[in-house]
Amino acid sequence: MAKSYYEFFCPVKVVAGHKALEHIPFELSTLQATRPMIITDKGVRGAGLLEHVAAAFEGAESQVVAIFDDVPPDSSLHTVRKAAAMYRENNCDAIIAIGGGSVIDTSKGVNILVTEGGDDLLKYSGAHNLPKRLKPFFVVPTTSGTGSEVTMVAVVSDTDKGVKLPFTSYFLMPNAAILDSRMTLTLPPHITAMTGMDALTHAVEAYTCLAANPMSDAYATAAIRKISQNIMKVMDNPKDAEGRLELAQASTMAGVAFSNSMVGLVHALGHSLGAVCHIPHGLCMSLFLPYVLEYNQEKNGERIGELLLYLAGEEVFAATPKAQRAAKAIQHIRAMRDELYQRCKLPRTLTETGKVREDQLAQVAELTVNDGAIIFNPKEADVQDALAILKRAWA
């Protein structure tokens, strides 16, 4: 199916390598910034990852003048305001986010406040409500999962009202994503597995959902291949720097893909399960991916079948008759989940999480059909359809 019209946009510079951090001072200087603030969390700081960054600034004219390490797992308006206050007190002129999805989302929120002034983030929520470019902003991902370092989206919780606020603007995109293998070497196995499956889902949905286009396809398929070839290597040898860098690149490529072609029903279900049962996003993706592909198979089985090449390699693809490729691709993803379960007990079903009750499934199904991601799913789904998938994923 040729696309008659699409748009593709990725202005984020990618700096990748085993010593990519050393390039941050130069990247700051190109934007006339010399007083960056680091935003991170206690886990990243505790793992000693900031020491690599400090070493990168030795002898540089720019110097880190403030470090905010108080970002919780679920970013909140309160956190954004606190970090913005520290930025202002220290006369900072740039932000370096070092962490996973929550840290990156928080940093995007902080950048809105320190650029626009004031403390009211709410007036900028929604789509395209920012009037101008923000301050210089760099992201150093420490998980290979969210792809948030190349997206124009941030989600920040309003803990007082108990709602998640979405922000969408081209101005939220960082100036550069710095992918350095040293920053993911200490990731524990279960987080490596969860974030790897998160990235895989981004790429698979980008490729199989309605807004896929030739540009996003190139990024999505390359990401799928890198994840398939490297995730088990890294699970078996967490200090494999090459494998870590491959997964980091795959996550970023998957981020480029899905921010240009959207996601589908896996995300709609995942967002809803996360909201009701407070299960990490990456795990939600892993829980639903094979079941949603099975549901979509009658509509876009050929497209799912094409994934077999990137998931399992040329020989398996060539040896599988065309009509069986979709089923084989789904089977391959199931086998990946089984292997991850053996290695780190990453749950494969809702019951294995131990955090979901069967009487919550109806509520999750209701939320799913009202989630924006469902619009791009190749096959329409109503509440009964969503509930049927949840029941398949139950045990």
Image (cartoon, rainbow, N blue to C red):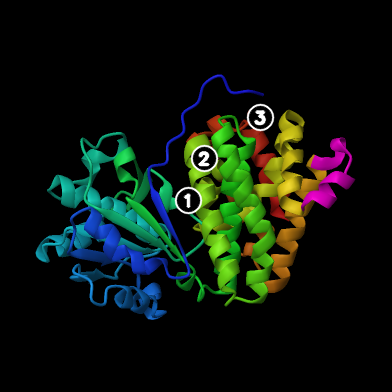
Instruction: Please identify the quarter of the rendering in which residue 324 is found.
Output: top right
Is residue 347 visible in the rendered structure shown here? no
Is residue 225 visible in the rendered structure shown here? yes
Looking at the picture, tell me which residue is in the foreground, 16 or 36: 16
Q: Which structural element holds mark 1?
A: helix
Predominant SS of the magenta segment: helix
- In the rendering, which numbered label is found on residue 379? 3
Left or right: 76 with respect to 362? left
Magenta residues (range):
313-325
Q: Amino acid at mark 1?
A: Ala
How many labels, in total? 3
Residue sitting at 75 percent across and 46 percent down?
Answer: 309
Q: Which structural element holds mark 3?
A: loop
Cα gap from disc 2 to disc 1, whole angstroms: 9 Å
* Rendered location of residue 363, percent (x, y): 55, 44
Cα gap from disc 3 to disc 2, whole angstroms: 17 Å
Residue sitting at 65 percent across and 40 percent down?
Answer: 387
- Which of label 3 and label 1 is nearer to you? 3
Q: Earlier in the sequence, mark 3 or mark 1?
A: 1
- Which of label 3 and label 2 is nearer to you? 3
Q: Which residue is mark 1?
A: 275
Q: Which residue occupies the extreme top position in the image?
A: 4
Q: Which residue is mark 2?
A: 367
Looking at the picture, tell me which residue is in the foreground, 28 or 46: 28
Looking at the picture, tell me which residue is in the foreground, 48 or 244: 244
Q: Amino acid at mark 3?
A: Lys
